[in-house]
Image (cartoon, grey):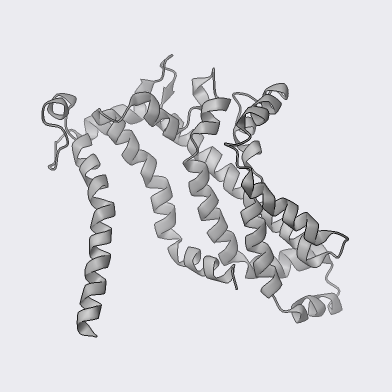
Amino acid sequence: MKRVAILDHAILIAGCLFMVLPVLTIFLTSTHDNLSIARNGLQFSWGGHFLDVYGGVLTGTTGFFRSITAAGMLANSLILALGMAIGKCTLALLSAYALVYFRFRYSSLAFWLIFTSLLLPIETRIVPTFLVVSDLGMLNSYTGLILPLLPAAIGTLFFRQFFKSVPEELAEAARLDGAGPFRFLVDILIPISRPVIVALFVITFVEGWNQYLWPLMVSTTDEGYFTIVRGIGRIGGASNSGMALSILAMLPPVALVIVLQRWLVRGLTDGFH
């Protein structure tokens, strides 16, 4: 048993190193000047230019028209990720609540129609979606960035499975106490659904933060709406600025997952009873 435990830990440590070492290499390389990187390639030691490189990346303008900074792109990514996460969680919660607790004809059909939308992610319908957003005048806007990404079939499935695991006696007790549908949702369901909400929030936040193709389509003429992921593609990763931007792009989602990891694991297990 002891040998098995040692082997298990060795595999876990090897997996961690496999994940962390490339990121550490990129970070160390980003602290060197571009001349050293061009001559020697990737670096595995501290370069001493951390403040110069990262300060320049955060405050220096970039883009074709030099109208956006990394700080601005981080803010745009944060708005997109938060808007997408909050919107998806809200829509998924309300749609699952209606499907489980409101009796109407063809509710199962409605759920399966929602679920089949998983077969049509934004990438498969990007041209018609772009045309609709363009006709509505939402190009180069946060509304155009966020609104088409809000359909949340997987979130509806998540909450539906959790709500089905909630004892019927809880809803009956709420009705006996005179609680209406809204009060039952706000005072009972939402508090006990917090782990599932947090898990879905984290997943959709990371998904929104990593969006590239849709922001590329929507912010076609105004660089003020560039996201950090698009900025990496614009600057390029072969320079210290590109590597520094890559490190900055990793920090918010990684920090969110680390801070909420217990809630994330609990929500994932609670959501699929």
State which quadrant residue 4 falls in: bottom left
Q: Residue furthest top?
A: 65
**Residue 87 shows in the view:** no
Q: Position of residue 149 (x, y in %)?
A: 62, 40
Q: Is residue 3 left or right of residue 237?
A: left
Q: Is residue 174 left or right of residue 126?
A: right
Residue 142, position in %: x, y? Answer: 60, 32
Q: Residue at x 38, y 21 (%)?
A: 62
Residue situated in front as seen by the camera: 254 or 236: 236
Tell me the quarter of the picture where residue 219 sits: top right
Image quarter in which the N terminus is found: bottom left
Q: Judge whether 270 appears above or below 117 on screen.
A: below
All told, the count of numbered labels is 0
Please give the name of the residue rendered at 48% of the width and 27% of the height, measured from the top-left corner.
226
Query: Which residue does the image show at 66% across and 46% down from the upper left?
Result: 151
114 to 5, vertically: above or below: above
Residue closer to the observer: 178 or 76: 76
Q: Residue at x 65, y 60 (%)?
A: 157
> Residue 99: x, y in percent?
77, 61
Query: Does 259 sit left or right of 237 as displayed?
Result: right
Residue, far bottom? 1
**Image location (x, y in percent) of residue 74:** 44, 35
Report the residue that reaches farthest toward the right. Answer: 105
Report if residue 249 is visible in the image: yes
Quarter that holds the C terminus: bottom right
